[in-house]
Each structure stands twice: as C-alpha cells, then as structure tokens.
Image: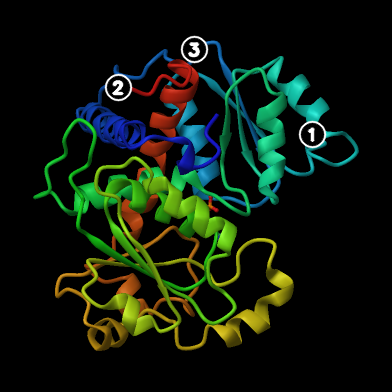
Amino acid sequence: HLMSISDLTPSEFTSLVRNASNHKAAVKDAWSADGTPQSLSGTLTGKTVAMMFSKRSTRTRVSTEAAVALMGGHPMFLGKDDIQLGVNESLHDTSVVISSMTSCMVARVGPHSDVANLAKHSSVPVINALSDDFHPLQTIADFLTIHEAFPERVPTESSLGLEGLKIAWIGDSNNVLFDLATACVKMGIHISVASPVGYGIPDAMKQVIVSAGDGVASPGKLTETTIPEEAVRDSDILVTDTWISMGQEVDAQKRLNAFSGFQITNELAERGGAKPDWKFMHCLPRHPEEVADEVFYSPRSLVFPEAENRLWAAVAALEGFVVNKGNLL
Ligand code: CP
Ligand code: NVA
C-alpha cells in the first residue's frame, strides 16, 4: 500500500521519481512521433483500478484515469454518491468486496483512518489519493518537478542529488505539507515552514516528519516560524497551498483572517531574501489569496509542469504497487 511518503525508504522514493521521469520521456517521445507508447502498454491489461473519491478532484482523478488507460487497464471512478464509502456499510465490508473484484483501490478520503482501514482489509494494493493527513502522489510529482527544475544536480542510485536545497512553505500546515516535508527530510532538503500562530504542525505529525530522517545519511532539516520572511531567507523554492482545505469550509472566514500577510508576492520574496532565481510551486487548485498573479503566472512558476507531473507520478505508483507488487527497487 502507499499511505504516505513515510512508508518509503529514500531509495524507494528515489526509484518512484526516477521511474516517473523515465516514463514521461519515453511516452512523450512516442506521442510527439505520433506513435503508440510501447513502454507501458499492456502492463495493466485485464485489470480494473477502483477510484473511490469522497472529495472533489481535478488532477488526481484525471491523472489516475489517464495513467490506467496508458497502461491498458480499466479505471472505475466511484464518487461519493456512487458507493457506500463509510456510509451505510463499514469500510471493512467495502474493502473486502471491492478488492475481490479489482486489482487496486485508489482512495481519496477525509480522516486518514478511512484509507488506512481500506488498506487493512484489502487483498489488493491501496493508494492514498489524499487524506486529511497525507498526499503522497502529489509529493512524488513535486519531486519530479524539482528534479527537472535543477538539471545541474546529478542523481545517484539512491538519491536525486537535491541535497542542500532549501524550500520555504508559506501557509497552512496541511496534508500536502506533511508528505512534502517528510520527503524533504529523507532527501536532505531543508524545509522551513511559516504558518500563523495556531496553524503550525501538530506535535504528532512533527514526530512523523522528523523521524523520516532516522538512518538517513544526511537528513534534511525541518524548521518552523510564524514569520513568513524568516522562512523565505535563502530559499530556492517558495511553496504554498490553499488556506482552506476540503473539509475546512466552515472555518473559511476565520482562516482568511488568520492567514492575512501570508500571501506569496515578489515583494515578500525580496524582503525575506529568497535566492535570486527562486522558483514557485503549488499543488493546485489555487486561490488568489495565497499567491499573487505576478508570481503564479510568472516564469518562476512551476505550477503547470507540476500538475502535468501528476500523470507520471500516477504511472510510477501504479507500476510500483500494482504491476511490481510493491517491489520498488
Ligand atoms: N493537487 C491535487 O490533488 O488536485 P486535485 O484536488 O484537483 O486532485
Ligand atoms: N490541502 C488541499 C489539497 C488539495 C489538493 C486539500 O486537502 O483540500
């Protein structure tokens, strides 16, 4: 199962990102020659991937369906009004039944325990397509994007060669951050998080992130502040996400007030002292309050390649967990 990035060793994570990159190159070469991509064709023939989504999605849905199609399988989308995902039937029963008829479940849920429960009772691999706590497919795509944005950094067998980079996360401490930070610690990247008072990383989650460095030769560092400029200093990449994640809509106004002053702008980057050629990332969907247009639509912005890379991350994850049954190396 792929529940979160903390399930993966640095070598396994590196291998997923590298495979995503290799498949991207091979498939896009075939597409640009008007040919049929050969490298993946038939790897999921005869297999159905159940996509159980209890929350909205553009990128995760489209990338997963497209990845399964590229691999010759059948993606079966099951939205919250289609099946009994934790409503009127236990997750245990749902998991046993759906895994008896399919080769993989890709699930987007609220509480992380929902996807963990599906995995516990499933006879096939389960991939977390976002829970309230983690978003591993996004992190694989994000590291592919960072790898592409720093071509002078040479990957090795067990590392992407990104050690020593600094990422500044300016905004809410949420699911996207938790897996991104875990990967940073594993891959030797310093991640500095600026969130308003009361919106920092919960202690239990901090423990998960920091322990990602156990046994790692040169783990990355996690630092926290409530002052955006402090996090920005010397950063190579500025990252944010929505201030109001799915499920937090009732607190929207309170959150908008609390995050005032946290919008990523050119002025903030300059005042904070980001590196001169700093880049910008965002998992999308984006709202103007968390990042100004001047940054979001600028040449610094990696957001659209980052979104496309969700496809290649989905391909690599399905290959790793379904075709190769979790043997990622
Ligand atoms: N980034 C991301 O997961 O987008 P969706 O919610 O549209 O899938
Ligand atoms: N933090 C956001 C990410 C959406 C892809 C949410 O959970 O809604």
Question: Which of pointers 3 and 1 lies earlier in the amino acid sequence?
Answer: 3
Q: Residues within 10 Å of mark 1 (few under 14, many from 20)?
A: many
Q: Which residue is mark 3?
A: 45
* Numbered label attached to residue 91: 1
Q: Residues within 10 Å of mark 2 (few under 14, many from 20)?
A: some
Viewer-proximal residue, 280 or 208? 208
The alpha-carbon separation of the residues under discs 1 and 2 comes to 37 Å
Tell me residue 197's x, y (percent).
55, 82
Q: Considering the image in quadrants, where does the N terminus appear?
A: top right
Q: Residue at x 58, y 57 (%)?
A: 204
Tell me residue 308's x, y (percent).
36, 47
Q: Residue at x 66, y 17 (%)?
A: 123
| Three-letter residue code for mark 2 | Pro
| Three-letter residue code for mark 1 | Leu
Q: Looking at the rendering, which quadrant does residue 203 occupy?
A: bottom right
Identify the element where label 2 is drawn: loop
Above or below, comparing residue 57 to residue 263 in the picture: above
Above or below, comparing residue 61 to residue 274 in the picture: above
Q: Residue at x 59, y 83 (%)?
A: 256
Mark 1 vs 2: CB contact within 8 A: no
Tell me residue 209's x, y (percent).
46, 53
| Three-letter residue code for mark 3 | Thr
Residue 308 at least partly seen = no
The alpha-carbon separation of the residues under discs 2 and 3 comes to 15 Å
